Image: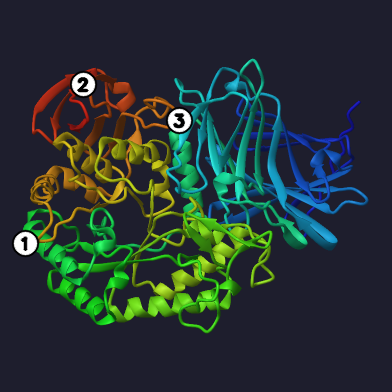
Amino acid sequence: MKRYILVLALFAGLGLLWSCASDAEMRWKEGRWQLISQSGKTTVYLDSTMVFPELIAAYRLDSVVKTSDYTGHAARRYEIEDELGKGVCYEVEHTRSGLPDLVQRFYFYPGKTCFFTEIELVGDALLACGYMAPVKTTGTPAFLQEQGQFLFVPFDNDCWVKYDVRPLAGEQLSYEVSALFQPRSRRGLIVGSVEHDAWKTGVRSQTDQAGSVNGVECFGGVTSALTRDTLQHGKLKGKTVKSPKVMVGIFDDWRTGMEEYALANARIAPAPEWKQGTPFGWNSWGSIQQHINFDKAIQVSDFFKENLQDQGFSNDSTLYIDLDSFWDNFSDEQLKEFVDHCHRNGQKAGIYWVPFTDWFRDPERKVEGTDTPYREVYLYANGKEQSLDGAWAIDPTHPAVKKRIDYFTERFHRAGFEYIKIDFLTHGAMEADSHADSNVTTGIQAYNQGMKYLLDAFKGKFYITQAISPVFPSHYAHSRRIACDAFAAITDSEYTLNGLSYGWWLCNAYRFNDADHLLMFREGITEGENRARVTSGVITGIYMNGDDLTLAGPKVAKERVKKFFTNAEINRIARIGRSFRPVYGYRPTANGRAENFFVLEQEQVVYVVAFNFAKDRPLEYTLAFSDLNLDPARTYSATELWSGVNEEFTMELKGQVPPADVQVWKIKKL
């Protein structure tokens, strides 16, 4: 027989205390949420929907210990106010002789269909923990009993890794966050970390042979080849050790849930402030690459001044001319003159840097700005240098690496640069044998220390975009590449759009997403591919060309840039600065590929984009108004923005996209 022991008492002015025997049942109701906890196991309901039949938390010291292994359980409720707003916290303290105390917290905020949870170990002696799971479940959530989908989010954007939606079958693993959802109804469960200061977080699902989810786990302490690690996750140490805070939510539309998840991250750790519009500009890596020099950079600046700026390719009366790798072909005097020349042309100058890598792989070479040899700053794994993408990783916590940051950022400040692309950042997050700062024991701790130092060194004077980098933390840059190294072909557009299909929501964590440089010219590239590549950029985020526009550059490149980067209606979309949603979110052309259809709703118009990635056949499509949040009973006027064709549509949007091309519809709502 269950025993109910309910002792109501004021607890230090904070709230109410429930003191319970090990087999007692505790019931909490907060808004639409209800939790029933007994013996360290919690059943979670949203209204009448059972979200988790059995939720526990777990950690590992010498072996895995679960909340259900504890014998004493006491809870209290108190009001909170934090970055996420005003709410309440239910705090459960689990105790057992011979184990550290385990504090489990559930945070609720009014009107939300999500809550947040974390665990914290408290001991008398030093603890060392490399695995903590605030969310670990058994049993099948009611709404996931039918075959669903699992959103795979990669840890970073290196090595052409792709997002994916996969059938909920067997074991699946995502990084930092995932959505488990029903495709047709769109209803979904969002589970993911909203703190990224110490842990690499994994989200794992387990499905039985019948296709029902019988386990979901969100845990700090994941490493794998996809986190670029050869070592296990480092252990956090102290008399108290805390897990990442995790968001758990049920949403009628999982796409809305992912956007809410990104906003929660931004509220806890906001990206650098940006009061200007979407950056427009050019980057040298697209075509010129290692051949960039002073004369070529000046010629590109002049091309934009003479051919594009007065034709609508600019924003906030400026654009950015960005030097990528091999800017060291310039002298410091030439860098300063390049910046001044851009200013005379009504432009701002950008540059590129890699803060956590040694591309020379020379252990005896001195770290720039110091007398320290590079061998002292490498991140070693099992006593060996760690190589990724051909470069050796260096320790973000090492004093010499920080002096190197000072050395380069001071050069950038002196020259007058105002935009920077930082690259190969994952190197700084790799787990290592040790770090120079002995208080740092995980790769993400080291990464945060280095990135904070770098951000401070920019002094708020740079627009910062991250290229190859972990998806989180997101508060050290204004934007991040949604996919890296995409060029001109329809396959490049599709690769970019794979990131947009399943990572569009990151524009709520960063200020913008970044679609990489948009090229118009490569041998054999069609004008349809040009339209698709430009469109893939403007519906993603920042808007950067990458063609060779020097005096000796290909004539066709210049003609096409002038043609496709001066469409006023297309450029107006770029100025909105918002990433488009996938219309469906579960219909990629194949596994690891992209969606064909994207949508952005504005106050007076709805933009709908249809891509055809096939080179050998047209794409005929029909999109129901209900999928576009349009009234099926109305007739709407629409304009296709590349051709200028006007149409009227009732109940559905129908069209045909030529091979390797795109259509962009602007539908008037009023």
Label 3 sits on a secondary structure element that is: loop
Instruction: Mark 3 and mark 2 in contact? Answer it, CB < 8 Å.
Output: no
Q: Is residue 199 left or right of residue 348?
A: right
Q: Can residue 13 be seen in this view?
A: no
Residue 395 rendering spot, x and y as whole percentages: 57, 68
Q: Which of 628/216 is in front?
A: 216
Residue 626 rendering spot, x and y as whole percentages: 32, 22
Q: Residue at x 45, y 65 (%)?
A: 359
Q: In this view, does 452 lie to the left or right of 348?
A: right
On-image quarter of the C terminus: top left
Residue 277 rendering spot, x and y as whole percentages: 26, 58
Whichever of callouts 1 and 3 sits on the residue coming sooner in the sequence is 3
Q: Which residue lies furthest to the top in this view?
A: 210
On-image quarter of the N terminus: top right
With respect to residue 120, does 169 lie above or below? above
Residue to which mark 2 is pinned: 618
Instruction: Mark 2 and mark 1 in contact? Answer it, CB < 8 Å.
Output: no
Spatial separation of the CA atoms under disc 1 and disc 3: 47 Å
Circle on res. 253: 3
Residue flagged by tag 1: what amino acid is it? Answer: Glu
Label 1 sits on a secondary structure element that is: helix
Residue to which mark 1 is pinned: 306
Spatial separation of the CA atoms under disc 3 and disc 2: 31 Å
Q: Which of 125/285 is in front?
A: 285
With respect to residue 25, does 70 lie above or below? below
User: How many residues crowd mark 2 within 10 Å: few (<14), some (14–19), many (20+)?
Assistant: some
